[in-house]
Amino acid sequence: MLPRLSIDFQGSDIDRAALVIMHYQVDVFDILFGKEPSPLLDRCNALIRSWRATGRPVLFPNFSLGEEYEHAPPATNRQISPYLPSGRFRTGLPVEGLAIERGDLFYACPRASVFYGTALDADLRTRGVSTLVMAGISTTGVVLSSVAWASDADYDVRLVQDCCYDPDRDAHEALLRSGFGGRVQVV
């Protein structure tokens, strides 16, 4: 099933929009899906391919703590610290099969928010972007942190629900149902 998009790819907002695909990366897919194929990847690729017709930017911020964990948080960070013993998240290598093309932009993000410690906001503003079409894994992690930041920074955020996932289905549904407390338009 293709994403349920209610985004007008021909409207005036598209001239100031960018597609941001968050944490579609090897380590995330390994943890959540193992070696099983995920329909989530197919839906996201359909979104990316549809988006490319707009000629607007596609950005792939992925979680990365550095090869030597030089960007690892202190042990008080309850969200990230539990992953350190696993040896994961040293790189933000995109998941195999993701619809990446030359010219796409990539960011290594040291925290759940794709804006923390990256040039993402500056790059978007340089390109005149004011609308973000976003999707990511997980809803209670990168999506929650990033859409809250983007909303506070006055971006118009559209969240593609069919390309978001969280293993905590109740929290996932509650966040989507509320539009993240009214911060985003869920499409």
Image: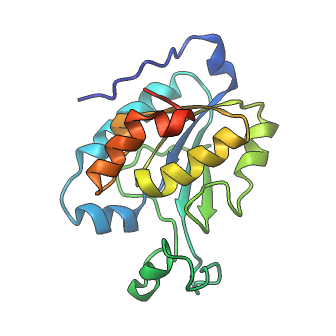
User: Residue 104 location in percent, x, y?
Assistant: 59, 44
Q: Quadrant where the C terminus lies?
A: top left
Q: Is residue 175 above or below residue 49?
A: below
Q: Residue at x 50, y 55 (%)?
A: 142
Q: Residue at x 65, y 12 (%)?
A: 12
Q: Residue at the top extreme?
A: 11
Compared with residue 69, is residue 183 higher up or lower down, i.e. above or below? above
The answer to whether residue 24 of the structure is visible from this angle is no
- For residue 56, what is the image quadrant? top right
Q: Would residue 60 be visible to someone looking at this image?
A: yes
Q: How many marks?
A: 0
Q: Position of residue 32 (x, y in %)?
A: 28, 63
User: Is 58 situated left or right of 125 in this image?
Assistant: left
Task: Determine the residue located farthest toward the left in the rendered image.
Answer: 36
Quadrant of residue 116 in the image? bottom right
Residue occupying the point 54% across, 32% down? 182
Residue 170 shown left or right of residue 124 in the figure? left
Measuring from the top left, give residue 81's x and y in whole percent: 49, 80
Q: Quadrant of the N terminus?
A: top left
x, y (%) of residue 54? 56, 22
Q: Residue at image x 73%, y 47%?
A: 121
The colour scheme used here is rainbow
Using residue 165 as the reference point, say whether residue 143 is left or right of it: right
